[in-house]
Amino acid sequence: MITLRPLQPINEYVHLCTRVASQLTVDVMAQSMSSKYGFDLPLIENLLEPIGRIERQLIEHLDSQDSDFNLLYHHDPTQFMSIGQALVLLFNNDESLPQLTDEQWRKFLTMVVHNPLGINDAVLPDPLPQLSDLTKTIIDSDYDATIKYNLMVLLNRPKELLENVYKGYLAFKPHLLPHLDAMNQIAQTALEPYTSLSVDAFIKTIQTDLNVREIPKYDPLLIQPTFFNYNALSFLDEPWDSDTAENLVWYLGIKLLPITDLLKVSDDQKQRIQSVLKTLSDPSKLELLKLCAKQPSYGVPLAKELGLTTATVSYHLNALVRLGYLTMSLDGNKVYYVTQNDRILADLNAVSALFK
């Protein structure tokens, strides 16, 4: 059975703030997608306009002098999520301010420190480290200086920052709620063709549409649509602090599938051959394909192997997934990449056919 949740207003507020603070607003994203993928600009602007309307309201509402806003929500490409997005996980589908025990705080902070701002792909140490040990972990890490600073602030002011997220949400809530019914209707309409399927059929469809492989199967399966984190696909065991996963939540951006459809339509044979030649002439992408052909691997060891930042490797991996040269599979909370030799050879044969 598949269950589609309603939008979670506080989660949507935090995702919206992160886009605004990180200057990933609708107008910027539309221009970027148009330039990168050759989309018709008015088409992509129209697709994202329902998001842009509420985004503009938030910008008018914000106090531009609030230093904590940027601290909470700005993140650069080397971060998986903002501090605010990490903290909102603690609400766990509830709009009341969570009251966490010291043990829960240490578990959450350990997760974030060991996985820069929320990448939940590591086994947490047992026993949990003390805050002084977490501080040393941050100092000794090879994280970017901005991430180090944000993590240190989070360690020293976790409850205060969590309260600031909540206060900001309560202040903007009256502006957000009038749009909620329409937002939920858009989400319901966008995802209904998928949620009416069986769990097996849904997973098979997602594997085909989004090129994701070996997804863990849970029945029932919860789908949490996100409106403002609209191009996201992620998986979360819940509750966030359980030792054994009881369920899997899919966080599915309601604009992800239409954007993917646009990518497929725009990718005619000529454009594909150009992309193929450009991709295979890139030494880093070629090396990634070779490494992932030897054995499935994930971002961090690949970055170390190539001497590149995780952000750069993530960019290359995403490009290779879009071409179908890599598929993704989940093992726990790690996303592994596997080279698809047949797809590469098929494209090379298509290139060869041009000269026959």
Image (tube, rainbow, N blue to C red):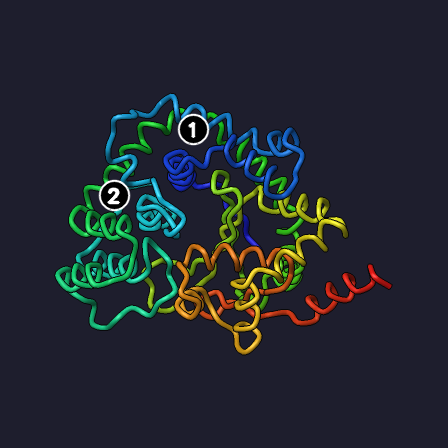
The image's mark for residue 28 is: none
For the point 33% across and 25% down, the residue is: 62
Write the residue at 30% across / 36% down: 70
Q: CA distance from mark 1 to mark 2?
A: 20 Å
Along the horizontal axis of the image, is 59 left or right of 137? Answer: right
Tag 1 residue: 176
The amino acid pointed to by label 1 is Leu
Residue 145 percent coordinates (x, y) = 26, 51
Q: Residue furthest bottom?
A: 294
- In the rendered view, tell whether residue 52 sits above or below residue 272: above
Q: Quadrant of residue 209?
A: bottom right
Residue 162: image tag: 2
For this orientation, the residue located farthest to the top is: 60
At a point 23% along the width and 58% down the height, the residue shown is 104
- x%, y% of residue 35? 59, 38
- Left or right? Give the position of 338 relative to 88: right
Secondary structure beneath label 2: helix
Rendered view: 283 above or below 35: below
Seen from the viewer's position, the closer of residues 275 and 76 is 275
Tell me if label 1 and label 2 are in contact, CB under 8 Å. Answer: no
Q: Quadrant of residue 163?
A: top left
Quadrant location of the C terminus?
bottom right
